[in-house]
Image (cartoon, grey):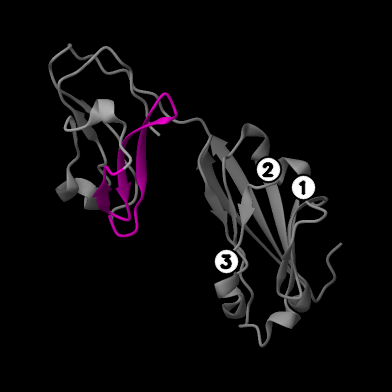
Amino acid sequence: MLKSSEMSLQVTVEGVIGGSVVLPCSAREPQLTTEDITVNWRYCDRLIVYEIIKGKVSVEGQQQTYKNRTESFPEKYLRGNFSLKLDDLQHSDAGKYQCYIIDESTIETVELRIKVPLQVLIVGYVGDSVVLPCSSELNTAEGITVNWRHNDSLKVYDIIKGKISVEEQDSANENRTESFPQAYKTGNFSLKLNKLQSYMYQFP
């Protein structure tokens, strides 16, 4: 129960199945020392998701379903940023998360909504080229990372922090892929696939 002196805020964020999302949580004032920092993340006000105790991460009592899927940003603790990154999103992750900042008696509630990735059917002919569409609401390429995969595993094409990377590209796709760097700033990360073969590709 909240006391009259406590403050509660609520925000909503969205993520997609298999993706990652950052659940925001910040203190009203910068922290003086890491030893003063104790923050508890809970799901539905009871399940332990993540804890920061006296400035140190603790996952000892963490709910099993969150094992190896959570991380925070220790370098930002003293600035009052206790946001939580949740990876490999699942349908069951949807719901309300509470971030308790003990020193300030502050509770921030974050509602996570999970969306199913969009699927688009593209028809191409063996030997020809095709453009596989992918767009984002982000209007800047700075820091953006996009991964194209075949059947969720084989690496087709990567855009890492706004720069093309094909170092780990599957050999079957060598010299057959290209994107449109000039369109990254508009949120266009579509992939052109040349010399089509009898395979099906998907994003992400």
Residue 40 percent location from the top left of the image:
76, 63
In the image: residue 150, left or right of residue 193: right
In the image: residue 139, left or right of residue 35: left
Asked if residue 26 is among those painted magenta in the image, a careful observer would answer no
The magenta stretch is 141-167
Q: Which residue is mark 2?
A: 95
Q: Which residue is most to the left?
A: 128
- The front one of 19 and 5 is 19
* Mark 3 vs mark 2, CA separation in Å: 22 Å
Q: Which residue is mark 3?
A: 73
- The front one of 31 and 151 is 151
Please report the residue visible at 14 percent of the width from the left and 22 percent of the height from the top.
129
Residue 194 percent location from the top left of the image:
15, 25
In the image: residue 150, left or right of residue 71: left
Q: Which residue is mark 1?
A: 44
Circles 3 and 2: CB atoms closer than 8 Å = no
Residue 191 percent location from the top left of the image:
23, 34
Location of the C terminus by quadrant is: top left
The relative height of residue 200 versus residue 34 in the rendered view (above or below) is above
Circles 1 and 2: CB atoms closer than 8 Å = yes
Q: Residues within 10 Å of mark 3 (few under 14, many from 20)?
A: few
